[in-house]
Image: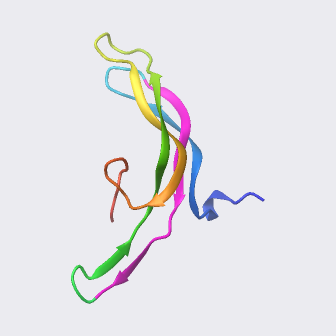
Amino acid sequence: MTTPLQSFRGCAVREFSFVAQKPGCKGLHITTEACWGRCHTWERPILEPPFIHRHHRVCTYSRIRHMMARLPGCLPNVSSLYHYPMALQCHCTFCSMEDTECQTF
């Protein structure tokens, strides 16, 4: 039985497509594996500063393979090499700005 993506809870490797771009080169469509999912999170009010206790986890890479592609149509002084990660394994963990875009609202 397959779980629809809208009701999936957890963190998993999933196929992901994007257009790799950088100044001085044409774009290249790349299909790879990336992390995707929803992780358990909660907030609880407390009486003293900071007045809230947060437990926010994100779905992110736990194991990756470093991949490389050559972008087409690059100017003579621009390297055509484009580096990106391919997910091998994912997990729910606290957001680290070293390797993940962390946003708070």
Magenta extent: 27-46
Looking at the figure, which quarter contains the C terminus? bottom left
Q: Position of residue 55 (x, y in %)?
A: 39, 72
- In the image, residue 35 sits, relative to residue 45, either above or below, namely above
Q: Position of residue 59 (x, y in %)?
A: 48, 57
**Does residue 104 appear left or right of residue 35 in this picture?**
left
Residue in view at x 63 percent, y 57 percent: 5
Quarter of the view holding residue 24 = top left
Task: Specify whether 7 is left or right of 28.
Answer: right
Residue 103, percent from left and from top: 34, 58
Q: Which residue is the extreme one toward the top?
A: 76
> Is residue 35 found inside the magenta-colored segment of the image?
yes
Q: How is the image coloured?
A: rainbow
Q: Residue at x 21, y 82 (%)?
A: 49
Identify which residue is drawn at 57% across, 62% down: 10
Residue at the right extreme of this rendering: 1
Magenta highlight on residue 10: no
Place residue 52 in its image quadrant. Answer: bottom left
Q: Residue furthest bottom?
A: 47
